């Protein structure tokens, strides 16, 4: 599964983004990975895929929190 391999690789990558454009790019990448995994999950119903989606969602939330900044 190429999508699962990409998702695992993204999860293992360091998440130190220097610029806003890097944060936006990674946020879009992780969003597309989550949606692709969701399509696979709908067919296979594998709980490991759901766990991977949850872990990626946490990473995505951290990135977006950093993008929005503090009020």
Image: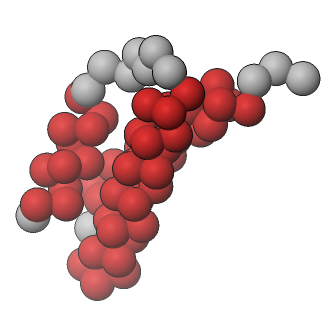
Which residue is painted at 65% across and 31% down in the image?
67
State whether residue 25 appears in this view. yes
Q: Quadrant of residue 16?
A: top left
At which x and y percent is residue 9? 19, 38
Q: Quadrant of residue 47?
A: bottom left
At which x and y percent is residue 38? 39, 70
Q: Which is nearer the eye, 52 or 12?
A: 12
From the image, which quarter does the C terminus lie in? top right
Q: Which is nearer the eye, 7 or 20?
A: 20
Relative to 62, 9 lies left or right: left
At which x and y percent is residue 27? 49, 43
From the image, which quarter does the N terminus lie in? bottom left
Relative to 31, 11 lies left or right: left
Which residue is painted at 50% across and 33% down in the image?
21
Q: Quadrant of residue 70?
A: top right
| 47, above or below 39, in the image | above
Q: Which is nearer the eye, 65 or 4?
A: 65
Relative to 22, 63 lies left or right: right
| 62, above or below 4, in the image | above
State whether residue 58 appears in this view. no
Relative to 63, 2 lies left or right: left
| 4, above or below 21, in the image | below
Which residue is painted at 29% across and 84% down in the image?
43
Which residue is painted at 64% across and 25% down in the image?
66
């Amino acid at each position: 599964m190429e999508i699962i391999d990409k998702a695992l690789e993204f999860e293992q990558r360091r998440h130190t983004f220097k610029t806003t454009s890097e944060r936006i790019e990674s946020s879009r990448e992780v969003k597309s990975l989550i949606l692709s995994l969701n399509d696979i999950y709908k067919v296979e119903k594998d709980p490991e895929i759901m766990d991977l989606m949850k872990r990626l969602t946490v990473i995505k939330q951290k990135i977006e929190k950093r993008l929005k900044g503090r009020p």
